[in-house]
Amino acid sequence: MTRKIEKQAAGSIIARQIEEAMDLLPMNGSGAVEAAFSFSEGFSGFQGHFPSRKVFPGVCQIMCVLALLARWQGTEARLAEITNVKYVLPVLPGDVVNLKITGLKELGAGLFSLKASMTKGSERVSEFRLKALLGYSQAS
């Protein structure tokens, strides 16, 4: 039980740090949203993830997608399913990455599908196809 509480606390810290690292970019009215992120070496997600060469974990990239989706839609977002994911290029401390969410489609009962891509400059970092629950309550 203590281990579960420790993991939840660590997840909350990382989620807060991801929120703080997000810089929304101007909306272009195309049904998409974009934000820039940058994480210092002190970011909690880097701890224990390749200590000799810190790499931004894939799970944290997914957390960035959910944080941006929540901010864009003005409600809480929770991962329901990873339909497809492709990691191409590592993200290192200090890198600035752009995350773009497109193709948001309502599937019913608060479930949405979406596409997201992360880039570093002109290079592709990762691509995602996810399903997320929007507007869920903490009790669910």
Image (cartoon, helix red, strand yellow):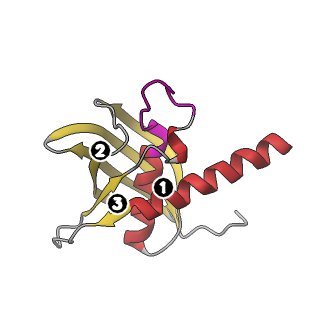
Label 1, on which residue?
A: 132
Q: What number is the disc on residue 105?
A: 3
What secondary structure characterizes most of the magenta part? Answer: loop
- Mark with earlier residue (3, 1): 3
Q: Is residue 93 visible?
A: yes
Is 32 placed left or right of 77 in the picture?
left
Nearer-the-camera pick, 68 or 89 = 89
Tell me the crowding category of disc 1: few under 14, some 14 to 19, or many 20 or more residues within 10 angstroms, Cα based: many
Q: Which range is magenta? A: 48-60
Tell me the crowding category of disc 2: few under 14, some 14 to 19, or many 20 or more residues within 10 angstroms, Cα based: some
**Residue 56 lies in the magenta stretch:** yes
Is 44 placed left or right of 53 in the picture?
right
Q: What number is the disc on residue 95?
A: 2
Residue 116: percent from the left, percent from the top? Answer: 31, 49
Residues at circles 3 and 1 in contact by the CB criterion of under 8 Å: no
Amino acid at dot 3: Lys
